Structures are given as structure tokens and as C-alpha cells.
Amino acid sequence: MMPAGNLARMVMANTLRSRRHFVLSAFGIVIGIATFVVFLASTEQVGAVLEKIFPVEQVSVIAPRASLLGKDISKKLDDAIVEKIRSRPEVDRADPTAVVPRMSLAFPAFGRGDFEGNDLKFEVGGFADGINPDYVTDDDRTRELFKDWDAMANDPKRIACEPPARDPQEEVIQSPPAPKGKASRPGVYYNPCTQPERYYCDEVDRTCHHRVPIVMSPTMIELYNGQFAKSHGLPIADTDFVKFVTQRGGLSAMRFSVGLGLTTIAGTNANISQRKVRRVEAVLVGISDKAMPIGMTMPIGYIQRWNREFLGEDAATAYSSIIVRLKDRNRIAVFSQWLQDDLDLRLEDSLGEKFATALFVIRLVLVLISLVIITISSINIAHNFFMQVTERRRELGLLRAVGAAQTDVLMVVLGEAALIGLIGGLLGVVLGIALASGVDWGSAHYLPRFPYKPDSWFHFKWWIVLGGLACSTGFSVFGGYLPARRASTMEPAQALTQN
Amino acid sequence: MLEKGDVVAFARVSDISRSRPPAAPAPIVRLRDVTKSYGLGAAKTQVLRGVSFDIDGGEFVALVGQSGSGKSTLLNIIGGLDQPDAGEVEVLGTDTLRSSDARRAGIRNASIGFVFQAFNLLDHLTVLGNVILPASFAPGAKQVESRGREALRRVGLSDLANRRPGELSGGQKQRVAIARALFNAPALLLCDEPTGNLDSETGKEVIDFFRELNAKEGVTLLIVTHERRVSSVAKRVIAMRDGMLVETTDEALAAAHGGPA
């Protein structure tokens, strides 16, 4: 067999000496591979965005809603249910974050904060819940701040302080820190705690408490930017900027107060004793997809204590849902059946699963379309190579006369097909990336902003590029095989007499 | 019958063996009952009919005959470019009929050189590239370029190494083809009408080169030709007619050359 280096040189020289043949053969491959990588990259990116919106690696267990004469009689999700779920074979018992209960704030609350000079008031009751802080591990800063500070003993900053006077309107007020280098304004209450951006003076025990750490989901930011900010003339909150501010210690921009027992919906807190109504202060410490989609999430200890304080022990032990991460997502059906049969519980409707299935089908169809294009180009290559072999009969006969074996001729022709496939594939990938860039530019300049709009509609992972090149080379070799066989088996004597 | 008084000489076996003449070297080419036909059924044409002959090393043989006599087919079979239907073909000690394609290709690469009437140069390669083409299929080939330039020097074309075949005359092209055939210093040179496309002067140069090659270097030459000027230079002439060898009488030679002797 001819040496590999000689084979490579001959293949390179033969492939590049006829531009017409190269263009005719490679054109289909370029188009096919461009569509192949573009389709895969776009479905990959869309899938990633969908997984942000609907995390499909976890499911949410809820109790089916049941009511009697207006009273909620749904089954209670408690620690016993959590333990039963944790002991299931589908769940990794050793992972403390595999089963994470959530608890909603079960009574009215009202929030107030300053955002970019705007006095924002918003309902908190029904839009707040709590989870285990160990579950929120998005970054170091969030891990450092998202803790149940009130449960910690021996916080040296918990010093005695004088809280602000109650507002006769019972509106929640904020407690800004004293201005630095300037005289305090008379009649204005200033936060007396050290580190006022992190601590506030609690009006119940008159000591400085760490602000309640809050995380919000990216969905909240997207909704704010897409719907709320526009209609209210408020500035856009870029997710990265919010993260930057919360994590660089600029917590003062994200402080707000919460009036426990107060509400913007008149009359709905009639069952709350006015003696219990009180103010706490909170601070946004990070953005996390572990937060509830619409609302705010805090360490579950706060919710449990407040529910106990305002509604009793039952409310402090009832979870609103239980998030479960299964070892194998393919076991969802088995797990779901057990929930229904043994516990009378169910999984929350997972739009994520449905979207993932739809995306899978779409990806399959698109990939099949591009494979059809590549197959047609493979047939085109076969046709072109058959023509070439006929045109080059004398040349191939000469190679045999000077010592080329049949396998040598086969390898030369197959090598030319492979090289056309490889170069065509590279050009196809470049074309695909260029097309994708064009689409992204058009999207950035002409598509309006909407929740979760990605910066790019494509994600060209390394395996997509390699897969494209492998496909182009493989299909080209497939197309070139029969012509190569014909070239290698032609009688040299007859080939040399071709006119 | 021995009688009393006759002198009888005895000798040891070893002495007897030393006294025998040495065995003749094996022929470079050995053909026995080689037949070849083309086509099928009613269109079947018998090209070779039981051809047998030997060519010894160092011979300069001309194979003559009219068009269609089977001489080019015979040349191709000897060179392994075609396969007979039956018979024995032994080239340089190898039974080519029973050898693999790779073995035959190896013999062509290392030990046989071809020169064709149509030159068969590759236009996309330079002159030097054409000459060293056999090296592409020779594992471990060394000093390729220097050997190629030496081959060009032998045929007087050292200055044209970087030209393309399209820039050469017919005679120059044929000399490049000869240089290519001599690149691997073959033991056997097979030439099919090498002067067929050349003018008389150039053709004479080529023939003189072949004669010198055979005389000085002992290269075995088999030249298919219908030209008298070529066959007259050969030391041995084999005539063919209708696929068979015929006696090389003057009449046969005249017929082979297409005219009176």
C-alpha cells in the first residue's frame, strides 16, 4: 500500500486542481452542513432557555386542591410526607437538596421600598415563600447572605436600639441610614444599627436584626422589565446589573420593608389581630431560579416563625409544595403513580416536560431535513465522481502502470471524496455561524424585548461542530465509494487506450 | 562391449558434477500457451491463441505484427496490465497469473518500466513530478528528487524539470516518459510503439537511446512496433499474426511491417 504521506499529497493535489469539480461536489455539502449545525444549535439554545423557565430535572409535588363550604381541606404536606418521599428509590437519600419543601406565607403582608427614587408599594402575602437556604447555591455572595439570621445565636451586631415610632396610617415605613457627612434632618428617623444596609432595628425586641434575605427568580426580572417597568415608566432592571449590585455589597439599593399583617386589599386582614401587626425589613441578595417564579423567596425559618406567630402551629408545619429531584428523569412516571396511589398527591402540571417533548420532536424533524439535504448532496458527489473517474480513466490507468495497486487507487479516490467532505463541512459550519450571527443581529435590532429573550438564538457546542464535520466527511465518502471501486477495478490496459 | 586390455577411467561423483556445464539463468519472461479473448458470445474475438516464448535477461526483442495481431495485448499481459484467459505467465520469477494484484503492482513499480505511444504524461504535474510518479507507490523510497533529476539528465532534459508537459514537443514528452520508466532502474522495459507519434529524427534518437541502454546497462527490452527501423535494431524479432507467433521469415516480417522487406 502506498505510504500515507504520499497518499495525502496526491489527494490534496488532485482535489484542489479542479475548482469546477470541487464546487460542484462540495456545494450541496456546504448547504447541508450549514442547515444541520444551525438547526442543532438553535434547538440546543431554545432548549436551554426552556429549561431555565421550566427546570425539567425536578418535579413539584402538591396536594390536589379540595374545599368544603369555602374551607380548604386539601391534604397537608408535612415532614412525614417529606420523609416518605426521601425514602423512595427514585430519590438520592444522601443528597440533602434532593427533596426540598417550600412553605408559603399564609397571611397578608404588604411591602414598600424605594427603587431609583420611586416609592413602590406591593402585596407580599401570596407572593412570598420559604425554602431551605442550602438549596440556594447560585453564587458565593448569595450563599453568604441567604441564611436564617434570626435563628443564629450570638450575632455580635444584635445590639439594643430604638425602633421608629408607629405610623398612625399604619403604613410601612423605611428606615434609611443617617446621611454621612451631613446633618440629620429633624423629625426623620434614621437606622441606628451598625451596617444599616444589612441590619435594622426590630420594633418587637428593640434589637438590631439582620434584614430578611430575599432572592427573586429571573422570571420576576423579566416580567418587571417586559410588563411593569414599561407601563409605569420605571427604569429597566438588567439581570446582570441586579446581580452585580446585590453581590458587590450595594445592598442599599435593594432594601424594602414588609408589614406583616397589612395588605393593599382592604378587609382581607380582618382576622389578623392588630397587636400582631408589625414591620420587618428585607433586602434582595440575589437572583436565583430556585426562587418562586412570581414573588420572593426567603429562608424557610422566617416563614415558619411568622406563620406560627400569626396563624398557629398548623400553618407553621404545612408546606405548599415539595420539590423533588429524581435520580433518573425517566422514572417520573413511576414516581408520579406512587404519589397518586399511596399518598393521594400529584405532580404539578409540568409545562416544562411538554415543551421539552415538543422541542425534541421539532429538533428531530429539523435534523431529518438537514440529513435529507446532506444525502442528496452525497448522491451529487457520487454522480460527479463517476463523471470524474470516466474523464480520468487514462490517468488512473497510468497510476496502475507505474505501480499503484487497486487499493491505492481506491484510497486516492476515496481520499478526494473525504477531503471534499471535510472542506465542504468546514465551509458549511462557517456559513452556519454566519447565518446565525445574522439572525441574532436581526433579533437584537428588530424583535421587541420579551421575557427570557436570549441574547443569541444559537449555541454552537463543540459536539455540534464536530458532528457536522463527521457527517460531511462520512456522507462524502459514502457517495464516493462506488466511483472509487469502479476506478480501482477498471482494467489498466483498457484505461490507457482511452481517447 | 568391454574386452581384455580396454582402459577404463573412473571418476568420483563430485568430479562428474563439476564437469557439467552451469545451468542457464531463468528467463526474465516466460509464456506458455497464453490465450486471451475479448467480448462475449458471437462478438467474442480471440486475440491470443496459445502464445509461448521466453525472453532472457539482457535481450532486446522486437514484437512485430500488423494491427490487431495481438502484440499490444501480449505486452500488457507481460506487464501485468491485463490478465490472460489461460496459460502461464512468469515475469522475473513470479507467476503473475496466480499472484495478487498488490504483488503484480509491486513488480511493476520496482522492476518494470513502461513507455507508451501516447506518452501518457500527467498535465497537472511538472516534468520532474511525472518522472518521480512511481515513487508515490514505493514504500520507503529515498532520494526521490535526486534520482528523478538523474533520470532527466540521462535523457538530456535536466533544464526542463519545472516545465509542464503542455510546453514540450513530442520528442521531449517521450523522453520524459522514458525517464519515468527508468526512474526505479527496472530490469525490464516494455515499450508499446514508442516512436509511433514521433518524427523520424526524434524516433531515431529514441531508438539509439534504447540500443545504448540495452548494450551498456543490460536492460531487457521488449518493444512492440510495426516500424522496420525499430525491429532492425533489435537483436531478436518475434512476429505475430492473428494472435499466434509465426516464423520470422522475410515474408512474415514484410507483412508485419506493412510492405516488402
Image (tube, coloured by chain):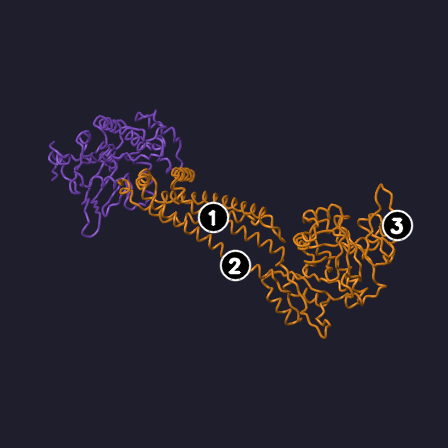
Q: Which mark is residue A379?
A: none
Q: Amino acid at mark 1?
A: Ile
> For the residues carrying marks 1 and 3, which lies nearer the camera in this image?
3
Q: Which residue is mark 2?
A: A361
Q: Which mark is residue A33?
A: 1
Secondary structure at badge 2 equals helix
Quarter of the image for the N terminus of chain A: give it. top left
Mark toward the start of the polypeptide (1 vs 2): 1
Instruction: Find the distance from the CA under tag 2 to the CA under tag 3.
Output: 66 Å
Q: Are marks 1 and 3 on the same chain?
A: yes
Instruction: Find the distance from the CA under tag 1 to the CA under tag 3.
Output: 72 Å
Verify CB contact (< 8 Å) between mark 1 and mark 2.
no
Query: Which chain does the numbered disc 2 sit on?
Result: A
Task: Please name the residue shown 54% across and 53% down the image.
Answer: A43
> For the residues carrying marks 2 and 3, which lies nearer the camera in this image?
3
Instruction: Find the distance from the CA under tag 1 to the CA under tag 2.
Output: 20 Å
Mark toward the start of the polypeptide (1 vs 3): 1
| Residue A304: % across, % down | 77, 62
Q: Label 2: how many residues lie within 10 Å, few (<14), some (14-19) or many (20+)?
A: few
Q: Which chain is purple?
A: B
| Residue B210: % across, % down | 25, 29
Q: Which residue is mark 3?
A: A187
Q: What's the colour of chain A in the image?
A: orange
Asked if residue B111 lies left or right of residue A61, the reply is left
| Residue B16: % across, % down | 23, 36
